[in-house]
Amino acid sequence: MDGNYYLDALVKGDSKVVSKIYDVNFKQVKRFILQNKGNTEDAEDIFQKALLQIAVRHKKDGIHINTTFDGFLFTVCKNLWRRELNSHKSRVTNSEIVEQVSEAKDNARAIIEQKRQELFIEMLDKISENCKMILSLFFAKVSYAEIIETTEYTSETVVRQRVFKCKKKLTDLIKEDLRFNSLREL
């Protein structure tokens, strides 16, 4: 079954499919959150927020998933959890002032971040296979020396130049897309 089957089931509230989504995906999300300073309750909250966010976006925008639904859901959960961790870092503790973060504002940020990632992945598909390979190694923090070993390049200087050119090509494609301005940070 493709990802759109699950999207439609979420919007319809199909309890059998939602249960299947939980059975298949929750353990992985819980493991990720437990390994990253969270607890089971955090994992449940993030998983529920992610499902709600996906359903709302699909109902509103009719999103289409190019990857597996499981991968898409995990990415949304990861992004929500990272944003949650970052918001805790930036809060100053003061017992007299209680900061309340709007749920709608938080969801809007999550949606924008997800759309940014989708734009990035879409543009990554438009660059050459060689650039995809080089950038995937670079983004995975593989050293230039290791990249030389796995490719036909002969020196770190050549690899650096190739990474620079590929990043520039990817950046240019992203900036040329009509969605770019609406997804920029204000």
Image: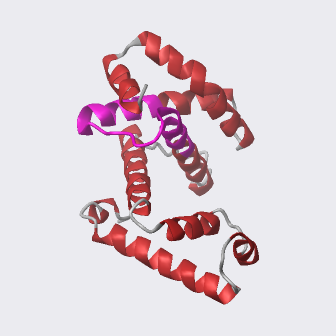
Task: Say how the picture is coloured.
Answer: secondary structure
In this view of the protein, which residue sits in the foreground, 178 or 68?
68
In the orientation shown, which residue stands out farthest toward the bottom?
Answer: 157
Quarter placement of the C terminus: bottom left
Q: Position of residue 185 (x, y in %)?
A: 38, 64
Q: Position of residue 40 (x, y in %)?
A: 67, 27
In the orientation shown, which residue stands out farthest toward the front?
Answer: 152
Q: How many marks?
A: 0
In this view of the protein, which residue sits in the foreground, 22 or 56?
22
Q: Position of residue 10 (x, y in %)?
A: 38, 22
Q: Is residue 68 above or below residue 84?
A: above
Q: Main secondary structure of the magenta part?
A: helix
For image coordinates 37% across by 25% down, the residue present is 5
- The answer to if 46 sits in the magenta stretch is no
For image coordinates 57% across by 43% down, the residue present is 78
In this view of the protein, which residue sits in the foreground, 44 or 93?
44
Q: Quadrant of residue 31?
A: top right
For image coordinates 36% across by 46% down, the residue present is 108
Q: Quadrant of residue 54?
A: top left
Q: Is residue 114 above or below residue 167?
A: above
User: Residue 134 vs residue 104: left or right?
Assistant: right
User: Residue 81 vs residue 125: left or right?
Assistant: right
**Which residues are the magenta region?**
50-78
Quarter placement of the N terminus: top left
For image coordinates 36% across by 16% down, the residue present is 13
